[in-house]
Amino acid sequence: MSELVDVDRQLGEVATARGMTPEAYADLLKGTVLSGFSQAEAAKAVGDIFRTNLDPLSEEVIFLRKGGAVTTAITYAGYTKIQRRDGISKVSTKYEDLEDGEVCCTATLGRYTPAGLEEYSRTEFLSECRRGGPVWKQMPRRMLGHRAIISATRLACGINLPSAEELEEVGFTGAVEPGPTGEATEIVIKELK
């Protein structure tokens, strides 16, 4: 199957799930979150929307740019949707102030299965996660809790895309501006044969 046909199929399925035609959904994406993307960047973005089943218009998944590269990131709202979708019914966090002045947070997620409660836990340490941004300075424990919950969600749900915050920490920025070549976004729709 060619990449174009695969993108067409993916776009069609995503559009149908949202009650739109592929053409209308493509136009909506081109005019908003994929504005200024090259054809290749738009195709990758559509593939990531399809694979994650997250809505870029609700900012559950966003696209960030660093240099000439565009990558997909999941927001905290996206991880929350993934938790609900994958049957996670328990989310808890426990903070600990350790003797050496370190703070850690353990997030535990659980889902009920016929065999009982399955739990997934991850611990994050403030010294490893804290960044210099204003939100981290104002609410470091809350941000640490979010980081631990995101990490546990990845473990429980098999997610391999980074969070938006992680990408911004390493220099990715919003990707709604025109790409480096200035190409207009064009999502090509073809009839499947």
Image (spheres, grey):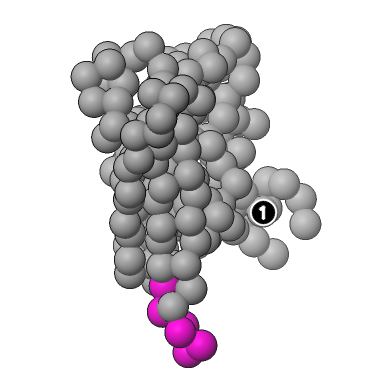
Instruction: Single out the residue that lies furthest toward the front.
Output: 99
Three-letter amino acid code at the position of disc 1 = Asp
Q: Secondary structure at mark 1?
A: helix
Q: Is residue 36 visible?
A: no
Main SS, magenta region, reads strand
Asked if the stretch drawn in magenta spans residue 113, the answer is yes
Per the image, the residue denoted by label 1 is 6
Q: Which stretch appears magenta?
A: 111-116
Instruction: Name the side, left or right, on which 12 lies relative to 174.
Output: right
Q: Is residue 58 visible?
A: yes
**The N terminus - image quarter:** bottom right
Q: Which residue is located at x 47 percent, y 67 percent?
A: 119
Residue 159 or residue 13, whichever sits in front: 159
**Residue 140 location (% of width, % of height):** 29, 26
Asked if the stretch drawn in magenta spans residue 121, the answer is no
**Residue 30 location (% of width, % of height):** 42, 33
**Residue 11 location (% of width, % of height):** 51, 52
